[in-house]
Image (spheres, helix red, strand yellow):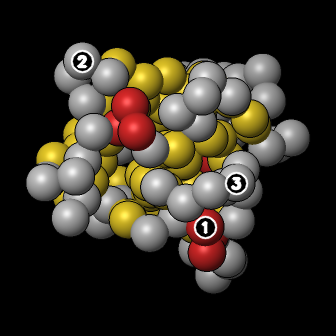
Amino acid sequence: QVVLVESGGGLVQPGGSLRLSCAASGSIAFISDMDMGWFRQPPGKQRELVALSTSAGDIRYSESVKGRFSISRDNAKNTVTLQLNSLKPEDTAVYYCAASTRVGLPTTRGAYQYWGQGTQVTVSS
């Protein structure tokens, strides 16, 4: 069982930054063995992948956040972080951390077995 808990969301002005963290716990919750993803779901829209970090070291970003967001992991602390820079109003969403132990690059929502409860990010002046 894997439990994921996100933190770090909030209200920020356009151009600002936030740092989201995801802490993993549970009986099989070593992120070093898992692929980790960050998704977001804007109001009234579908959940989308914004960044992923595989256990093998592969990192991918969606085109909409490339160059502005950065994903990193600390295997010793069992946490994964998403740094959000140059935020725009369209980045407003609930952000979710997710974990996958399945084979293959997890680029879709269905590839992830474990989810956090989400943290709200609001970008507004």
Could you tell me if the residues under marks 1 and 3 are in contact, i.e. CB atoms within 8 Å?
yes
Q: Which residue is mark 1?
A: 111
Q: Which residue is mark 3?
A: 104
Query: Crowdedness of circle 1 by 10 Å Cα count: few (<14), some, many (20+)?
Result: some
Q: Nearer the viewer, mark 1 or mark 3?
A: 3
Name the residue located 70 percent from the left edge and 54 percent from the top edge: 104
Name the residue located 55 percent from the left edge and 60 percent from the top edge: 102
Determine whether the residue tagged by mark 1 lies in a helix, strand or loop.
helix
Of mark 1 and mark 3, the one earlier in the sequence is 3
Residue 6 at least partly seen: yes
- From the viewer's perspective, is 120 left or right of 24? right
Residue 7 at least partly seen: no
Quarter holding residue 117: bottom left
Residue type, mark 1 in image = Ala
Q: Which residue is mark 2?
A: 76
Residue situated furthest bottom in the rendering: 44
